[in-house]
Image (cartoon, rainbow, N blue to C red):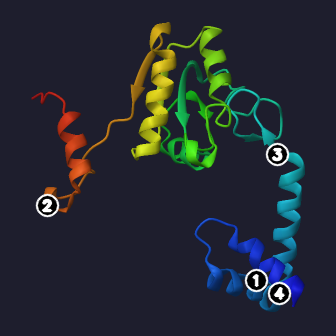
């Protein structure tokens, strides 16, 4: 059972997977879907061997420059800074953003030993210092850590003349005011815009 315990422990290391779910997944793969388990193992091994961080934006890529960074049709002068690759995928799904990205792979968390170096912020600052960047969009999560990270980046870049913007935050479409938490309502009020006919 030691091998099974190791598999369960490995699955528990994944986000949102607790002990019961890890055990169910392990048993399902081994008892009911061995071919699926082999496909999963092969795909994971191949991804580990072939995908590396893009040298410009830090997202996973088969080549040194990812498809987005090497796409000449994209607005190279606009960078959207995100906390995770998942955030990048969500923004890409909208089909609205035409610039490129910079993936931090986390947020500042001194207690966990995550500082600017671990997030690649010095490399981002180097890109800004090299010129050719007009706008930096800080699309970080509106929790305390995300806000602190955004503020840190803002403070490092504000003297460069590069426009720094944030995603609009506030009331989701179709949401009743009575169902909003105070923080969301506060952001909506402070980020209000002029109404036009």
For label 1, the crowd category at 10 Å Cα-Cα, with few meaning under 14, some 14 to 19 and many 20 or more, is: many
Q: Is residue 141 visible?
A: no
> According to the image, label 2 marks what residue?
178
Name the N-terminal-most of marks 4 and 2: 4
Q: CA distance from mark 4 to mark 3?
A: 27 Å
Screen quadrant of the C terminus: top left
Name the N-terminal-most of marks 1 and 2: 1
> According to the image, label 3 marks what residue?
51
Q: CA distance from mark 1 to mark 2?
A: 43 Å
Q: Residue furthest left?
A: 197
Q: Is residue 90 above or below residue 30?
A: above
Name the N-terminal-most of marks 1 and 3: 1
Circle 4: element type: helix
Query: With 90 as the anchor, is 175 left or right in this view?
Result: left
The numbered dot on residue 26 is: 1
Q: CA distance from mark 1 to mark 4?
A: 6 Å
Circle 1: element type: helix
- Quarter holding residue 118: top right
Screen quadrant of the N terminus: bottom right
- Quarter holding residue 51: top right
Residue 195 x %, y %: 12, 30
> According to the image, label 4 marks what residue?
30
């Amino acid at each position: 059972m030691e091998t099974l315990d190791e598999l369960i422990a490995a699955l528990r290391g994944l986000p949102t997977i607790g002990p019961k779910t890890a055990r169910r997944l392990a048993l399902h793969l081994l008892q009911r879907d061995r071919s699926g388990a082999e496909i999963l193992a092969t795909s994971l091994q191949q991804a580990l061997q072939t995908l590396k961080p893009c040298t410009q934006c830090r997202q996973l890529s088969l080549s040194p420059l990812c498809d987005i960074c090497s796409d000449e049709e994209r607005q190279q002068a606009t960078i959207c800074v995100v906390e995770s690759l998942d955030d990048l995928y969500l923004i890409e799904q909208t089909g609205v953003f035409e610039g490129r990205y910079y993936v931090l792979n986390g947020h500042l968390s001194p207690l966990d030993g995550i500082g600017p170096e671990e997030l690649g912020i010095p490399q981002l600052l180097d890109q800004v210092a090299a010129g050719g960047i007009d706008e930096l969009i800080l699309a970080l999560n509106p929790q305390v850590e995300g806000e602190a990270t955004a503020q840190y980046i803002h403070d490092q870049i504000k003297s460069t003349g590069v426009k720094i913007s944030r995603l609009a935050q506030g009331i989701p479409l179709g949401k009743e005011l009575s169902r909003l938490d105070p923080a969301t309502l506060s952001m909506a009020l402070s980020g209000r815009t002029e109404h036009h006919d």
